[in-house]
């Protein structure tokens, strides 16, 4: 089973491009997610927790979503699969090995930044956006449809 679930923040704005043959291009978005290591102690000299920087790639509709709604610093949860590939560098002629996560879903893990103008429904926070929105069984619930919406908040 090849499933990865990561929670972290984008280190910079995603890189969005169209790839493939003219007329049959696919959308592709690449970004790096900074993920703190669970249970790791802070470095006493810097005060920072050990962090891994994971390369993420999203395709088609999910890439369009990434391009439209994600930016540097945004906290998200990504689920997908680990993929490895290699290529020969044009500059060094050396074989380069790449390990990355191919995203299946992306969830917002923070609230919408105040300066971000989007046309997302207000209930879109923490809703998985599938790679193919035409998939059967897609259900995006509004707050009024969630079974735990009416639970009183203690405090």
Image (cartoon, rainbow, N blue to C red):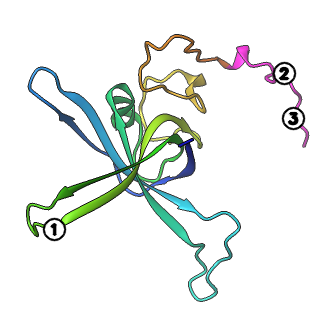
Residue at figure coordinates x 61%, y 80% from the top left? 47
First of labels 1, 3 by sequence position: 1
Residue identified by numbered label 2? 150
Front residue of 36 and 45: 36
145, above or below 111, in the image: above
> Where residue 127 sits in the image (x, y, percent)?
58, 28
The quarter holding residue 124 reads: top right
Residue at 34% x, 49% y is 13
Marks 3,2: beta carbons within 8 A: no
Residue 107 location, x and y as percent?
55, 36
Asked if the stretch drawn in magenta spans residue 146, the answer is yes
Q: Residue furthest bottom?
A: 45
The span picked out in magenta is 143-155
Report the number of discs: 3
Mark closer to the chain start, 1 or 2: 1
The rendered magenta stretch, by its main secondary structure, is classed as loop
Which dot marks residue 153? 3
């Amino acid at each position: 089973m090849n499933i990865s679930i990561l929670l972290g923040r984008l280190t910079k704005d995603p890189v969005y491009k169209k790839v493939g043959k003219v007329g049959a291009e696919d959308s592709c978005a690449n970004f790096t997610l900074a993920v703190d290591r669970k249970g790791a102690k802070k470095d006493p000299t810097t005060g920072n927790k050990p962090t891994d920087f994971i390369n993420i790639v999203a395709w088609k509709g999910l890439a369009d979503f990434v391009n439209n709604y994600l930016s540097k610093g945004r906290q998200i949860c990504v689920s997908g699969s680990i993929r490895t590939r290699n290529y020969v560098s044009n500059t060094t002629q050396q074989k380069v090995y790449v390990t990355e996560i191919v995203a299946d879903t992306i969830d917002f893990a923070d609230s919408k930044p105040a300066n971000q103008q989007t046309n997302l429904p207000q209930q879109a926070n923490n809703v998985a956006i599938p790679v193919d929105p035409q998939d059967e069984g897609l259900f995006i619930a509004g707050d009024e449809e969630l079974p735990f919406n009416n639970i009183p908040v203690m405090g």
